[in-house]
Image (cartoon, rainbow, N blue to C red):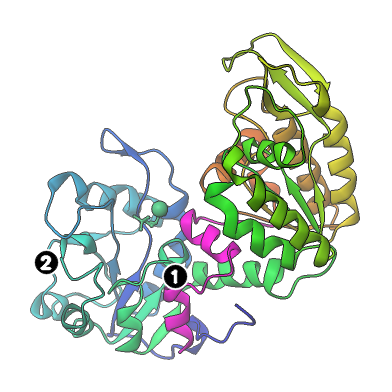
């Protein structure tokens, strides 16, 4: 992704009385019918309000869960209507099945949520017939769902080819931030990549060594790299079968002049439970019956110094088992350093991916990063350097 060549709402002209098909991501976490995190609801506010205030009929398209092409009541978007209306401060109508007559009868400026796009069998197949049918309901298409842009579905991709298409405000903000972080960043750039398994982030790591000046590897995946270098990691989570792959990544990094930082001290325990007895040791002193559960304080200090020399940070994945105390210390300390540097104007900090946002919230600094993506899978695919169909379609 280089530069941004898509149209935005600035290019949309007069939309009064026109029907806009607006793809948003309302795949929100819910428990007992209550939305437990409204980040994604809030993300749609700028686009929806701007279009409604310009007199457009705003027809919201979204998926919820994975109903696999058939109606299943537990995947209805109806329970999201009221929380969305509250966040927007506007009335939101619900349309189980869109029809041209019903849409024609809507007053200008109205906001309507259409039922889960994945109830239709054609959605995930990006079926051209379905795309044509849905496109007929609108005069223009807006994609404001970066977090679903890794899917080539009717509502994320197909419609963009059939109607005048624009990136919504959240999509625009997201793409601009990501472009500043990796597309055209200010160097030195540091990537923090953590999480449990190397296997789930191989392509991310391969891409990062080509793009960044410093790569900090933490979490369980650091153990695989340590083991590949001959360190005995005891009972630690470790993908021993990926030793060759880990060494290949380290070699590629060396060729690309990317400095890889692995922890040299670690916090270990014999059990993975809250507040067990722990030791902080050099990586070469892990006992056979111990497991590494966090990066140690000396390494954290060195890593903080690395952040201080950098201009741009991309963060995905926690440094340790942060959900179980006290193994959150490295993640929290490093996140706070990044937040402080951001506040001082020293660092542009961009983070994304499921547990990353949870980890930054846990550290209390999510608001202090320059940008925190609403995306999970889409953020990872972007870090892997893969084209995102929803974004590509806006550019063509
Ligand atoms: C997400 O929650 O990551 C997006 O909404 C995409 O959902 P999906 O993984 O079911 O396609
Ligand atoms: Mg997903």
Q: Quadrant of the N terminus?
A: bottom right
Residue at coordinates 57% horizontally, 38% vertically from top-left? 196
Q: How many marks?
A: 2
2 and 1 marks in contact (CB < 8 Å): no
Tell me how far mark 2 sits from mark 1, CA to CA: 23 Å
Q: Quick check: 242 left or right of 130?
A: right
Q: Quick check: 304 left or right of 140?
A: right
Marker disc for residue 142: none
**SS state under label 1:** helix
- Residue at image mark 1: 47
Q: Is residue 218 above or below residue 256?
A: above
What percent of the width, then of the height, locates residue 302?
Answer: 89, 40
Is residue 353 shown to the viewer in this render?
Answer: no
User: Would you say residue 379 sits in the magenta stretch?
Assistant: yes
Q: Is residue 155 above or below residue 217?
A: below
Q: Quadrant of residue 258?
A: bottom right
The tag earlier along the polypeptide, 2 or 1, is 1
Q: Quick check: 261 left or right of 220?
A: right
Q: Quadrant of residue 153?
A: bottom left
User: Would you say residue 325 sits in the magenta stretch?
Assistant: no
Pick the front one: 302 or 120:
302
Marker disc for residue 97: 2
């Amino acid at each position: 992704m280089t530069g941004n060549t898509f149209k935005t709402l600035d290019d949309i002209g007069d939309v009064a009385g026109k029907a806009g098909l607006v793809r948003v991501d309302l795949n929100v976490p819910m428990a007992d019918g209550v939305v437990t995190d409204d980040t994604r609801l809030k993300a749609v506010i700028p686009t929806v309000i701007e279009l409604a205030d310009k007199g457009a009929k705003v027809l919201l398209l979204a998926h919820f869960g994975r109903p696999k092409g058939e109606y299943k009541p537990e995947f209805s978007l109806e329970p999201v209507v009221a929380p969305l209306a509250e966040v927007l401060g506007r009335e939101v109508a619900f349309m189980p099945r869109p029809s041209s007559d019903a849409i024609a009868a809507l007053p200008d400026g109205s906001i309507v949520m259409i039922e889960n796009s994945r109830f239709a069998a054609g959605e995930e197949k990006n079926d051209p017939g379905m795309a044509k049918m849905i496109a007929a309901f609108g005069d223009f298409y807006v994609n404001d769902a970066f977090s679903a842009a890794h899917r080539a579905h009717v509502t994320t991709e197909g419609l963009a080819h059939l109607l005048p298409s624009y990136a919504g405000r959240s999509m625009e903000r997201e793409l601009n931030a990501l472009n500043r972080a990796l597309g055209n960043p200010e160097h030195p750039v540091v990537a923090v990549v953590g999480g449990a398994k190397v296997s789930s982030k191989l392509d991310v790591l391969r891409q990062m060594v080509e793009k960044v000046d410093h790569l900090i590897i933490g979490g369980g995946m650091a153990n695989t790299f340590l083991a590949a270098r001959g360190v005995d990691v005891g009972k630690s989570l470790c993908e021993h079968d990926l030793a060759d792959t880990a060494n290949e990544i380290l070699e590629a990094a060396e060729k690309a002049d990317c400095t890889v930082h692995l922890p040299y001290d670690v916090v270990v325990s014999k059990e993975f439970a809250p507040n067990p007895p722990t030791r902080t040791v050099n990586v070469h002193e892990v006992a056979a019956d111990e497991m590494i559960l966090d990066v140690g304080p000396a390494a954290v200090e060195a890593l903080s110094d690395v952040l201080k020399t950098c201009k741009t940070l991309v963060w995905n994945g926690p440094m340790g088992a942060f959900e179980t105390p006290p193994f959150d210390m490295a993640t929290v300390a490093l996140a706070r350093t990044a937040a402080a540097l951001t506040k001082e104007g020293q660092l542009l900090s961009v983070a994304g991916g499921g547990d990353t946002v949870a980890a930054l919230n846990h550290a209390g600094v999510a608001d202090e990063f320059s940008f925190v993506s609403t995306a999970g899978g889409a953020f990872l695919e972007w870090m892997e350097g893969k084209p995102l169909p929803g974004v590509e379609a806006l550019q063509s």
